[in-house]
Amino acid sequence: MKQRTIKRTYRFEGKGLHSGVFSHISISPAPEDSGIVLRRTDLGVDIPALAANVSNTARSTSISVGEATVMTVEHLLSALTGLGVDNALVEIDNLEVPILDGSARFYAEAICADGLVEQAAERRYLQLSEPVEVTNEHGSYVRITPAERPSMDVTIDFGSRVLGVQKAHWDESVDYASQIAPCRTFVFFHEVEFLASQGLVKGGDVDNAIVVVEHPVSEEQVTRMATLFGQPRLDVTPEGYLSNLTLRFPNECGRHKLLDLIGDLRLAGGWLAAHVEAFKPGHGINTAAAAAAATKII
Protein backbone atom coordinates (compact mmCIF):
# COMPACT_ATOMS: atom_id res chain seq x y z
CA MET A 1 0.00 0.00 0.00
CA LYS A 2 1.26 3.46 -0.89
CA GLN A 3 1.39 6.38 1.52
CA ARG A 4 -1.43 8.90 1.23
CA THR A 5 -2.09 12.52 2.00
CA ILE A 6 -5.15 14.73 1.66
CA LYS A 7 -6.07 16.56 -1.56
CA ARG A 8 -6.39 20.09 -0.26
CA THR A 9 -6.44 22.25 2.87
CA TYR A 10 -9.42 21.95 5.22
CA ARG A 11 -10.23 24.59 7.83
CA PHE A 12 -12.15 24.31 11.09
CA GLU A 13 -12.73 26.60 14.02
CA GLY A 14 -14.35 26.49 17.43
CA LYS A 15 -13.77 26.29 21.16
CA GLY A 16 -11.69 23.74 23.00
CA LEU A 17 -13.56 21.35 25.29
CA HIS A 18 -11.37 21.86 28.34
CA SER A 19 -9.75 25.28 27.89
CA GLY A 20 -12.76 26.99 26.30
CA VAL A 21 -10.36 28.95 24.06
CA PHE A 22 -11.36 29.62 20.46
CA SER A 23 -8.96 28.40 17.81
CA HIS A 24 -8.66 28.03 14.05
CA ILE A 25 -7.04 24.97 12.52
CA SER A 26 -6.09 24.01 9.00
CA ILE A 27 -5.20 20.50 7.82
CA SER A 28 -2.99 20.48 4.72
CA PRO A 29 -1.25 17.94 2.48
CA ALA A 30 2.29 16.98 3.51
CA PRO A 31 5.21 15.23 1.79
CA GLU A 32 5.96 11.53 2.01
CA ASP A 33 7.44 10.26 5.28
CA SER A 34 6.58 13.45 7.17
CA GLY A 35 3.87 11.82 9.32
CA ILE A 36 1.47 14.09 11.17
CA VAL A 37 2.84 17.34 12.55
CA LEU A 38 0.94 19.97 14.54
CA ARG A 39 2.25 23.52 14.16
CA ARG A 40 1.44 26.24 16.68
CA THR A 41 1.35 29.12 14.23
CA ASP A 42 1.13 31.69 17.04
CA LEU A 43 4.38 30.36 18.53
CA GLY A 44 6.18 29.11 15.42
CA VAL A 45 6.74 25.64 16.89
CA ASP A 46 6.21 22.25 15.23
CA ILE A 47 5.06 19.34 17.40
CA PRO A 48 5.30 15.90 15.76
CA ALA A 49 2.44 13.58 16.74
CA LEU A 50 4.61 11.12 18.68
CA ALA A 51 4.27 9.48 22.07
CA ALA A 52 7.56 11.05 23.18
CA ASN A 53 5.81 14.44 23.01
CA VAL A 54 2.82 13.51 25.19
CA SER A 55 2.67 16.00 28.07
CA ASN A 56 -0.75 15.48 29.69
CA THR A 57 -3.51 12.87 29.62
CA ALA A 58 -6.05 14.38 32.05
CA ARG A 59 -9.38 13.80 30.23
CA SER A 60 -7.70 14.30 26.83
CA THR A 61 -4.31 13.91 25.17
CA SER A 62 -1.92 16.87 24.95
CA ILE A 63 1.41 16.96 23.11
CA SER A 64 4.16 19.51 23.62
CA VAL A 65 7.56 20.69 22.47
CA GLY A 66 9.12 23.04 24.99
CA GLU A 67 6.50 25.56 26.09
CA ALA A 68 4.31 24.92 23.03
CA THR A 69 1.34 22.62 23.67
CA VAL A 70 -1.65 21.40 21.71
CA MET A 71 -4.47 19.89 23.76
CA THR A 72 -7.09 17.32 22.79
CA VAL A 73 -5.38 15.96 19.70
CA GLU A 74 -6.96 12.48 19.83
CA HIS A 75 -10.09 13.05 17.71
CA LEU A 76 -8.14 14.65 14.88
CA LEU A 77 -5.43 11.98 14.97
CA SER A 78 -8.14 9.32 15.01
CA ALA A 79 -9.80 10.78 11.92
CA LEU A 80 -6.57 10.95 9.97
CA THR A 81 -5.66 7.41 10.97
CA GLY A 82 -9.09 5.90 10.41
CA LEU A 83 -9.33 7.49 6.96
CA GLY A 84 -5.88 6.27 5.93
CA VAL A 85 -3.88 9.51 5.95
CA ASP A 86 -0.13 8.97 6.37
CA ASN A 87 1.07 12.56 6.07
CA ALA A 88 -0.56 15.85 7.04
CA LEU A 89 0.34 19.24 8.48
CA VAL A 90 -2.07 20.62 11.07
CA GLU A 91 -1.72 24.34 11.80
CA ILE A 92 -3.42 25.75 14.89
CA ASP A 93 -3.35 29.27 16.32
CA ASN A 94 -4.17 28.53 19.95
CA LEU A 95 -3.91 25.99 22.76
CA GLU A 96 -6.59 23.39 22.01
CA VAL A 97 -8.06 21.62 19.00
CA PRO A 98 -11.76 22.61 18.66
CA ILE A 99 -14.11 20.00 20.08
CA LEU A 100 -16.70 20.59 17.31
CA ASP A 101 -19.53 18.13 18.06
CA GLY A 102 -17.39 15.92 20.33
CA SER A 103 -16.57 13.40 17.60
CA ALA A 104 -14.41 13.13 14.47
CA ARG A 105 -17.42 13.42 12.16
CA PHE A 106 -16.70 16.81 10.57
CA TYR A 107 -13.09 15.91 9.76
CA ALA A 108 -14.22 12.65 8.17
CA GLU A 109 -17.00 14.23 6.13
CA ALA A 110 -14.74 16.95 4.75
CA ILE A 111 -11.86 14.67 3.80
CA CYS A 112 -14.04 11.87 2.42
CA ALA A 113 -15.79 14.30 0.09
CA ASP A 114 -12.54 14.74 -1.85
CA GLY A 115 -10.72 11.47 -1.23
CA LEU A 116 -6.98 11.06 -0.73
CA VAL A 117 -3.87 11.46 -2.88
CA GLU A 118 -1.65 8.42 -3.30
CA GLN A 119 2.05 9.16 -2.89
CA ALA A 120 5.04 7.36 -4.37
CA ALA A 121 6.51 5.88 -1.18
CA GLU A 122 5.28 2.66 0.37
CA ARG A 123 3.40 2.80 3.68
CA ARG A 124 5.51 1.27 6.44
CA TYR A 125 3.40 -0.64 8.91
CA LEU A 126 5.13 -0.67 12.28
CA GLN A 127 6.30 -4.20 13.06
CA LEU A 128 6.82 -5.12 16.71
CA SER A 129 9.57 -7.40 17.96
CA GLU A 130 7.30 -8.80 20.68
CA PRO A 131 3.86 -8.27 22.24
CA VAL A 132 3.27 -5.24 24.48
CA GLU A 133 0.93 -5.09 27.46
CA VAL A 134 0.26 -2.09 29.69
CA THR A 135 -1.95 -2.24 32.78
CA ASN A 136 -2.95 0.14 35.56
CA GLU A 137 -4.34 0.11 39.06
CA HIS A 138 -7.91 0.46 37.81
CA GLY A 139 -7.90 -2.94 36.11
CA SER A 140 -7.47 -1.43 32.65
CA TYR A 141 -5.18 -2.98 30.07
CA VAL A 142 -4.03 -2.50 26.50
CA ARG A 143 -2.52 -5.58 24.83
CA ILE A 144 -0.76 -5.18 21.49
CA THR A 145 0.04 -8.40 19.63
CA PRO A 146 1.96 -8.45 16.33
CA ALA A 147 -0.28 -9.23 13.34
CA GLU A 148 -0.30 -8.71 9.58
CA ARG A 149 -2.67 -5.72 9.68
CA PRO A 150 -4.02 -3.29 12.29
CA SER A 151 -7.16 -4.19 14.22
CA MET A 152 -8.62 -3.10 17.57
CA ASP A 153 -11.20 -4.45 20.00
CA VAL A 154 -12.39 -2.29 22.89
CA THR A 155 -14.48 -3.17 25.91
CA ILE A 156 -15.73 -0.53 28.32
CA ASP A 157 -17.18 -1.31 31.73
CA PHE A 158 -17.85 1.52 34.16
CA GLY A 159 -20.09 -0.62 36.35
CA SER A 160 -22.87 1.56 34.95
CA ARG A 161 -26.52 0.55 34.87
CA VAL A 162 -27.01 3.00 31.98
CA LEU A 163 -24.06 2.06 29.78
CA GLY A 164 -23.68 -1.59 30.73
CA VAL A 165 -20.71 -3.34 29.10
CA GLN A 166 -20.06 -2.08 25.58
CA LYS A 167 -17.77 -3.47 22.89
CA ALA A 168 -16.51 -1.99 19.62
CA HIS A 169 -14.24 -3.20 16.81
CA TRP A 170 -12.18 -1.57 14.07
CA ASP A 171 -9.94 -2.84 11.31
CA GLU A 172 -9.14 -1.53 7.85
CA SER A 173 -12.28 -3.12 6.39
CA VAL A 174 -14.57 -1.09 8.68
CA ASP A 175 -15.94 2.16 7.25
CA TYR A 176 -14.43 4.50 9.81
CA ALA A 177 -16.26 7.56 8.47
CA SER A 178 -19.74 6.15 9.09
CA GLN A 179 -19.16 3.70 11.92
CA ILE A 180 -16.60 5.34 14.23
CA ALA A 181 -16.13 9.02 13.34
CA PRO A 182 -19.67 10.18 14.36
CA CYS A 183 -19.35 8.83 17.93
CA ARG A 184 -19.25 11.62 20.50
CA THR A 185 -17.42 12.03 23.77
CA PHE A 186 -19.34 11.32 26.96
CA VAL A 187 -19.27 12.23 30.62
CA PHE A 188 -21.20 11.22 33.71
CA PHE A 189 -23.55 13.82 35.17
CA HIS A 190 -21.92 13.59 38.59
CA GLU A 191 -18.50 14.33 37.06
CA VAL A 192 -19.43 17.53 35.27
CA GLU A 193 -19.57 19.92 38.20
CA PHE A 194 -16.33 18.48 39.60
CA LEU A 195 -14.57 18.85 36.24
CA ALA A 196 -15.79 22.43 35.98
CA SER A 197 -14.39 23.15 39.46
CA GLN A 198 -11.01 21.80 38.26
CA GLY A 199 -10.92 24.25 35.36
CA LEU A 200 -11.89 21.64 32.77
CA VAL A 201 -14.84 21.36 30.35
CA LYS A 202 -14.92 25.14 29.93
CA GLY A 203 -15.99 24.55 26.35
CA GLY A 204 -18.46 21.76 27.13
CA ASP A 205 -22.06 22.22 26.11
CA VAL A 206 -25.10 20.21 25.14
CA ASP A 207 -23.97 20.00 21.52
CA ASN A 208 -20.67 18.22 22.04
CA ALA A 209 -21.05 15.63 24.81
CA ILE A 210 -23.29 12.76 25.83
CA VAL A 211 -24.15 13.17 29.53
CA VAL A 212 -24.83 9.88 31.33
CA VAL A 213 -27.11 10.24 34.37
CA GLU A 214 -26.06 7.23 36.42
CA HIS A 215 -27.55 8.23 39.78
CA PRO A 216 -30.91 9.85 40.65
CA VAL A 217 -30.73 13.64 40.38
CA SER A 218 -33.01 16.38 41.60
CA GLU A 219 -34.71 18.94 39.42
CA GLU A 220 -32.50 21.53 41.07
CA GLN A 221 -29.38 19.66 39.90
CA VAL A 222 -30.70 19.41 36.36
CA THR A 223 -31.53 23.12 36.39
CA ARG A 224 -28.00 23.89 37.59
CA MET A 225 -26.61 21.76 34.74
CA ALA A 226 -28.78 23.61 32.22
CA THR A 227 -27.38 26.89 33.54
CA LEU A 228 -23.82 25.56 33.27
CA PHE A 229 -24.50 24.61 29.65
CA GLY A 230 -26.36 27.85 28.88
CA GLN A 231 -29.65 26.09 28.18
CA PRO A 232 -33.18 27.16 29.25
CA ARG A 233 -34.16 23.60 30.18
CA LEU A 234 -32.89 20.02 30.23
CA ASP A 235 -34.46 16.71 31.28
CA VAL A 236 -33.33 13.16 31.95
CA THR A 237 -34.49 10.56 29.42
CA PRO A 238 -35.97 7.22 30.54
CA GLU A 239 -32.78 5.53 29.26
CA GLY A 240 -30.63 7.57 31.65
CA TYR A 241 -29.13 10.30 29.47
CA LEU A 242 -29.44 14.07 29.62
CA SER A 243 -31.95 15.17 26.99
CA ASN A 244 -29.48 17.22 24.96
CA LEU A 245 -29.13 14.72 22.12
CA THR A 246 -30.06 11.35 20.65
CA LEU A 247 -27.59 8.47 20.52
CA ARG A 248 -26.24 7.70 17.06
CA PHE A 249 -25.52 4.06 18.00
CA PRO A 250 -26.64 1.96 20.99
CA ASN A 251 -22.94 1.54 21.88
CA GLU A 252 -21.88 5.06 20.91
CA CYS A 253 -19.88 5.49 24.11
CA GLY A 254 -17.94 2.28 23.47
CA ARG A 255 -17.31 3.35 19.90
CA HIS A 256 -16.06 6.72 21.12
CA LYS A 257 -13.52 4.98 23.36
CA LEU A 258 -12.39 3.10 20.25
CA LEU A 259 -12.17 6.42 18.37
CA ASP A 260 -9.92 7.76 21.14
CA LEU A 261 -7.76 4.62 21.13
CA ILE A 262 -7.19 4.85 17.38
CA GLY A 263 -6.02 8.45 17.78
CA ASP A 264 -3.86 7.85 20.84
CA LEU A 265 -2.11 4.81 19.36
CA ARG A 266 -1.23 6.79 16.22
CA LEU A 267 1.33 8.41 18.52
CA ALA A 268 3.42 5.24 18.20
CA GLY A 269 4.46 6.82 14.92
CA GLY A 270 2.16 5.25 12.36
CA TRP A 271 0.04 2.15 11.80
CA LEU A 272 0.84 -0.69 14.17
CA ALA A 273 0.85 -4.05 12.39
CA ALA A 274 -0.85 -5.54 15.41
CA HIS A 275 -4.07 -6.57 17.04
CA VAL A 276 -4.96 -4.34 19.97
CA GLU A 277 -7.21 -5.52 22.77
CA ALA A 278 -8.18 -2.77 25.21
CA PHE A 279 -10.24 -3.13 28.38
CA LYS A 280 -11.44 0.08 30.03
CA PRO A 281 -9.02 2.23 27.99
CA GLY A 282 -8.28 5.88 28.67
CA HIS A 283 -5.81 8.46 27.44
CA GLY A 284 -3.20 7.68 30.09
CA ILE A 285 -2.98 3.96 29.39
CA ASN A 286 -3.48 4.44 25.63
CA THR A 287 -0.52 6.79 25.29
CA ALA A 288 1.59 4.65 27.64
CA ALA A 289 0.88 1.72 25.32
CA ALA A 290 1.85 3.84 22.29
CA ALA A 291 5.12 4.77 23.98
CA ALA A 292 5.82 1.15 24.94
CA ALA A 293 5.07 -0.04 21.41
CA ALA A 294 7.39 2.59 19.96
CA THR A 295 10.31 0.96 21.85
CA LYS A 296 9.55 -2.45 20.28
CA ILE A 297 9.43 -1.40 16.63
CA ILE A 298 11.71 -3.46 14.44
Image (cartoon, rainbow, N blue to C red):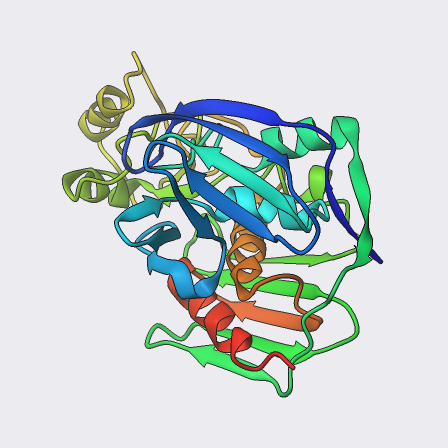
Q: Nearer the viewer, residue 113 or 1?
A: 1
Q: Nearer the viewer, residue 65 or 167?
A: 65
> Residue 209, position in %: x, y?
42, 34
Is residue 261 left or right of 69 when viewed as pictured?
A: right
Residue at far top of view: 232
Q: Quadrant of the C terminus?
A: bottom right
> Residue 195, position in %: x, y?
23, 43
Q: Nearer the viewer, residue 231 or 85?
A: 85
Q: Residue at x 80, y 39 (%)?
A: 117
Q: Quadrant of the N terminus?
A: bottom right
Q: Residue at x 26, y 44 (%)?
A: 190
Q: Is residue 125 visible?
A: yes
> Residue 130, position in %: x, y?
62, 88
Tell me where residue 199 sits by quadrant.
top left
Whether 43 is drawn above or below 163: the answer is: above
> Residue 256, position in %: x, y?
54, 47
Q: Nearer the viewer, residue 5 or 278?
A: 5
Residue at far left of view: 197
